[in-house]
């Protein structure tokens, strides 16, 4: 099939967390790719939203979002919040706690990297992101590649950052129920992010989806840049089975990677779309997405 570019992209990152582009650069790139509706969903952080909104004026519709880290059975899960009220006390409280955890974790990862011969790893990593950015393992992976200690971010994960490797630091993110509630209490729509990317059996994935739904979850990502048609069909059917709405997003972080803005984001016709939710109404999504 020829490359397909969606006009909507509801999962992207800026340098307010582990994206390489500033919010302004991200919006400009999205506009050039023909995107009309873009959600900025930085990790546990909404600091880039104001700049993105300003940059979006006259170019595209910017949707306020965030990607919250949470736990399900000790497994790290990402819940995207869309159409958020970024001033809501519930969101502010969640992000405030996450910020403390993320700084502690990033410092601990930095110390472990120093033992592997990296110099000033935490400070060096912070310098490469926006001031006060939410530092993730993604920031560290790019730094490790830049230092010539891995060929790719993926290799940086396999060698240093993933569970069981020398620089891994376990973190007690809040339960999925807490993340979902924070989003609902902030007038947002909770979306289970990239369901195919967790290292889970299909049985465990169904349990996660059932739990997410029980907690008040509303949508799930069906359109993801690197999804195979058979995986997409599988997830779309689960969406339908659990009466979840379907979302789509590239999870764009950096130019030149396969997760390009708008790329290959497809949702089968038989599932209802997240932009049909009443909270999406103010954003005036057009009926057609092609
Ligand atoms: P954290 O939330 O700090 O655990 O970092 C998660 C982020 O690391 C993800 O959002 C990705 O951007 C990045 N990441 C996770 N796994 C990989 C991988 N295998 N290769 C490259 N980046 C990854
Ligand atoms: Mn990331
Ligand atoms: Mn994620
Ligand atoms: Mn993401």
Image: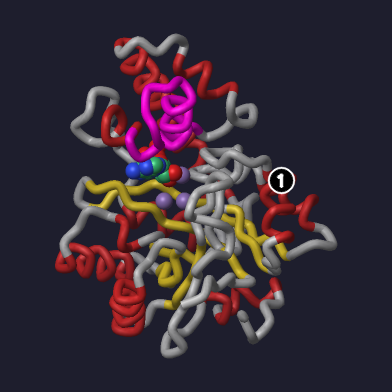
Q: Quick check: 237 above or below 126? A: below
Q: Which residues are magenta?
A: 135-155
Q: Quick check: 267 above or below 55? A: below
- Across and down, in percent, residue 275 comes to 57, 76
- Residue 144 in magenta? yes
133 to the left or right of 73: right
Identify which residue is drawn at 55% across, 23% down: 126
Seen from the viewer's position, the closer of residues 172 and 181 is 172
Identify which residue is drawn at 51% across, 75% down: 2
141 to the left or right of 10: left
Seen from the viewer's position, the closer of residues 72 and 290 is 290
287 to the left or right of 267: right
Q: How many marks?
A: 1
Q: Most extreme residue toward the front, as rendered?
A: 2
Crowd class of label 1 (few under 14; some 14 to 19; many from 20; radius 10 Å): some
Quadrant where the C terminus sits is bottom right
Q: Quick check: 258 above or below 163? A: below
Identify which residue is drawn at 47% across, 84% down: 272
Q: Most extreme residue toward the bottom, as rendered?
A: 270
- Across and down, in percent, residue 242 comes to 31, 80
- Across and down, in percent, residue 162 comes to 27, 35
- Across and down, in percent, residue 105 comes to 37, 27
Q: Quick check: 216 above or below 200? A: below
228 to the left or right of 17: left
Which picture quadrant has residue 119? top left
- Residue 138 in magenta? yes
Which picture quadrant has residue 10? bottom right
Name the residue carrying label 1: 25
């Amino acid at each position: 099939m020829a490359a397909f570019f969606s006009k909507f992209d509801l999962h992207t990152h800026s340098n307010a967390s582990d994206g390489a582009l500033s919010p302004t650069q991200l919006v400009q790139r999205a506009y050039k790719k023909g995107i009309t509706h873009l959600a900025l969903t930085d990790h546990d952080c909404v600091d880039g939203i104001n700049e993105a909104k300003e940059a979006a004026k006259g170019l595209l519709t910017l949707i306020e979002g965030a990607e919250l880290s949470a736990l399900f059975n000790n497994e790290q899960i990402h819940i995207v919040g869309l159409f958020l009220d970024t001033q809501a006390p519930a969101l502010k409280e969640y992000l405030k706690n996450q910020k403390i955890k993320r700084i502690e974790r990033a410092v601990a990862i930095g110390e472990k990297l120093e033992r592997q011969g990296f110099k000033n790893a935490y400070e060096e990593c912070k310098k490469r992101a926006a001031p006060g950015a939410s530092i993730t393992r993604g920031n560290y992976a790019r730094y490790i590649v830049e230092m010539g200690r891995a060929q790719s971010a993926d290799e940086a994960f396999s060698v240093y950052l993933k569970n069981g490797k020398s620089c891994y630091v376990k973190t007690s993110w809040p339960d999925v129920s807490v993340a979902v509630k924070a989003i609902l209490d902030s007038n947002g729509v909770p979306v289970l992010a990239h369901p195919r990317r967790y290292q889970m059996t299909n049985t465990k994935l169904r349990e996660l989806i059932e739990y997410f739904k029980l907690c008040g979850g509303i949508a799930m990502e069906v359109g993801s840049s690197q999804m195979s048609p058979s995986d997409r069909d599988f997830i779309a059917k689960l969406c339908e089975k659990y009466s979840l709405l379907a979302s789509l997003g590239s999870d764009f972080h950096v130019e030149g990677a396969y997760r390009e803005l708008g790329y290959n984001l497809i949702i089968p016709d038989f599932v209802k779309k997240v932009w049909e939710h009443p909270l999406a109404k103010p954003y005036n999504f057009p009926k057609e997405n092609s």
